[in-house]
Image: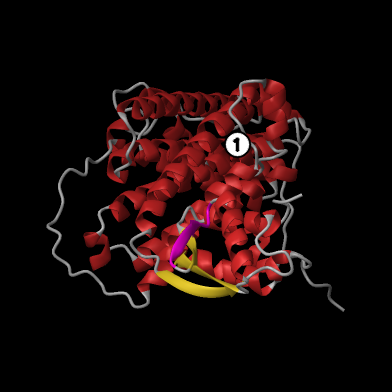
Amino acid sequence: MLEPKSLIQIISEEEFLILLQGRCGSFFRTFNALGEISESSTGVTRKFYSSLNQEAEWLESFLDEHGARENKTWARFTEYVASIRNLVKAAFFCRHITDRYPYYKLRDNEESEQGFFRDAAQVQQFLNQAIFNLYEECVREGRKNNLSVPENSVDPEGFGEVEANKRLPKNTEGDEVVEQEDRIIDLLEKLNSAESVMQSMNVEPTQDPKTLRELVPGRLDEKKARMLMNLIHSTQSEFDTYIKSTPLEQTHEEFKTIRGYISMPLHLLEMMIWMIHFYERHEDDIRKGEARTIISGLVIKTDLLAHVVNFCFFYTLYYVREGGKLSRKVLKYFVKSVRYELPVPEPLGFHARPSTYVSKIVRRYDAEAWLIIDGEKFDARSVMSLLQAGGVLADKGYKTAVFEGDRRVLDDLKILASHNYCEEKEVPEQLEYLRGSIG
């Protein structure tokens, strides 16, 4: 019986060198232009970063398909190419957010804007230098393996940025979207949710090397960064589906600004993901190896982590928070006020525990709600006001109370009341944010 032929043909390193020689010329010629372009008046453009990424990605794919990562001769070379690709992607997003900044219509004051651009320039310079260091090591490793590296480069003139200062007239009609209000409320609340998630991570700016290594990947790793990015990305997708290019967007100018407060954090997170990915995959603190030891000397890890924490995470949270402030303002246009009659807590009425739960629900939505007794209003945000209302209800012998205000608040209060304000029962799953809020 004939044995089936293996689908994989094992080739010699000499044969592989010939194959690689014919495939890597474009990679080297493109990266040879990096030094000249980075020193030009425009710096490295998004178009050039895209070309760098394409070349690195294509070469890495070729190396992986031929098992170079698992070959002693070519493993280091492959590791350098992969590291270059990671940081090129991060550098692209860094340049992208500074190029697009004017179009985001953010409400930064002059000091905040200058601070952002100053910090972004420092990160951009760090990434460019790191890419250049890795590329030089890649060239050395290739030549050590008898790879012929071309000295010439692509023409830098072909990578200038095209200025988009001319536009076609805007003359399309806005699309009507059905069932818009509930979707808008959900969308705007997602920004607030992202802020809460980020704050709960307890990642504060720091320059201390030990603290930075504890934060990344201890509290902030690639998985968490991708989770945040997916949350922001889903918000952007919903915005583009239900708000962008609709009459509603034309009616409320704030929506155009909110879109910027979604886009900026999204691209900062994309940038952060590639920097953390590089650190987790190619740095020697996490995975040992000769190439990773060399890489840690080419890319200063404390600087990398400082940029992850003090630029990417810091400004993501800053812009999410600013976007949340604006979204809460816009929410008031869409949230309906309702009135519910709800039972009084049994058996003690509105004492400290149920009053605190009610207050926390109202404050969570940064909204207004009132407990009304015979026309007299008590502020449901205030525990003291609710305690006062509890005394009035007890004096009058009322078993129910009328609440009026933001529908989102009252819907949650209705759930709370159906569980007797958690006097004997656990906090229901729908109100999970209340768990642990009262000792």
Quick check: 82 above or below 126? below
> Does residue 281 appear left or right of residue 87 in this picture?
right
The type of residue carrying mark 1 is: Ser
Question: From this viewpoint, is residue 66 visible?
Answer: yes
Q: Which corner quadrant of the image does residue 433 belong to?
A: bottom right
Residue closest to the eye, 217 or 433: 433
Residue closest to the eye, 38 or 436: 436
> At which x and y percent is residue 381?
53, 53
What segment is highlighted magenta in the picture?
Answer: 375-381
According to the picture, the residue beneath numbered tag 1 turns out to be 83
> At which x and y percent is residue 223?
66, 49
The verdict on residue 380 being magenta is: yes
State the count of labels.
1
> At which x and y percent is residue 60?
58, 45
Colour scheme of the picture? secondary structure
Badge 1: how crowded within 10 Å, few (<14), some, or many (20+)? many
Rendered-image quadrant of the N terminus:
bottom right
Residue shown at the point (70%, 41%) measured from the top left: 13
Outermost residue toward the front? Answer: 395
Q: Which corner quadrant of the image does residue 418 belong to?
A: bottom right
SS class of the residue under badge 1? helix
Residue shown at the point (64%, 28%) measured from the top left: 141
The verdict on residue 166 being magenta is: no
Quick check: 153 above or below 193? above
Residue shown at the point (39%, 59%) measured from the top left: 331
> Does residue 324 appear left or right of residue 400 in this picture?
left
Residue closest to the eye, 218 or 135: 218
Q: Which corner quadrant of the image does residue 173 belong to?
A: bottom left
Question: From this viewpoint, is residue 33 visible?
Answer: no
> At which x and y percent is residue 360?
59, 54
Quick check: 372 above or below 24? below
